[in-house]
Image (cartoon, grey):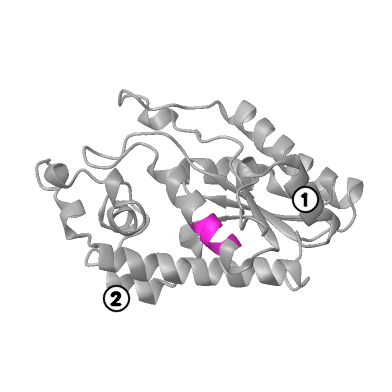
Amino acid sequence: MERREVLLEKMTRREFRERLQRGDIKAAIIATGSIEQHLEHLAMEHDIASATYIAQKVAYRLYPQVVVTVPMNIGISEHWMWALGTLSAKPGSWLSVLFDATESLVRHGVKKVLILNGHAGNSAPVKGILRQWQLYFARMHPGSNLQFANYWDFIPKELADEVLETKRFPGHGQEFETAIALYAFPDNVRQEVVTDQDDKEPSLATAEKGKLLVEKTVEEVAKFVAAMIEGKVTMATE
């Protein structure tokens, strides 16, 4: 019986090769995030953990068409370096690794790639160069389709307004992110510290709120990736 694995790093070369040769694999999601402070109560892996969690849920929903990979777990986080433990990459080197990971997938024949981001600090650098990358892939690898999005871009504002007391998202370690963590990976939340810190907004979060937000995000990202696979979402080539 074939393993229902979606994380590329967990596959053997044979498993990946056979799925690719059968034509099962149609697209890939590259998860990006950060290792940085998230107030006193959330684990520093929150951003990359969130993006990876959602990406994997999407891949299982669309199995066996989608694989997920995490080429690096740190992000562009110079603005949080005052907090001990934060890891930060320079934009140039970070973007180089991200590009190389994308090109590796495309060269293997996985030409439809979504970069799904979970850290706001990564967004502007990618958006600033994404058009150049898309033009390169269109010219060098015809049929390619590279897209970028933050996972919270898929959450309808009306849902966030209904679920969140603060009506703010994504925020940083606040109600939104804390709710995501309480639902997706509760071990990453130091419950005894949530109210024992200056910032009280995280105490508004609940796992039930996180469930509503995560499930909607997975649903919408899955629709987006499916549309990429079907050729309904494409990148401009001019």
Q: Quadrant of the N terminus?
A: bottom right
Q: Amino acid at mark 2?
A: Glu
Q: Would residue 218 be counted in the magenta stretch?
A: no
Numbered mark located on residue 134 in the image: 1
Task: Answer with mark 2 or mark 1, whichever residue precedes in sequence.
Answer: 1
- Counting from the top left corner in percent of width and height, residue 19 is at 77, 56
| In the rendered image, the vertical position of residue 54 relative to residue 135, given as above or below | below
Circle 2 sits on which residue?
A: 162
Q: Is residue 60 left or right of residue 229?
A: left
Q: Is residue 95 left or right of residue 135?
A: left
Numbered mark located on residue 2 in the image: none
| In the rendered image, the vertical position of residue 28 relative to residue 81, given as above or below | below
Q: Amino acid at mark 1?
A: Gln
Q: Is residue 206 left or right of residue 80?
A: left
Q: Is residue 132 left or right of residue 33?
A: right
- The Cα atoms of the two marked residues, 2 and 1, are separated by 36 Å
* Magenta residues (range): 54-59
Q: Residue at x 28, y 53 (%)?
A: 178
Q: Residues within 10 Å of mark 2 (few under 14, many from 20)?
A: few
Mark 1 secondary-structure assignment: helix
Q: Residues within 10 Å of mark 1 (few under 14, many from 20)?
A: many
Q: Residue at x 47, y 53 (%)?
A: 53
Q: Inspect this view and state whether residue 110 appears.
A: no
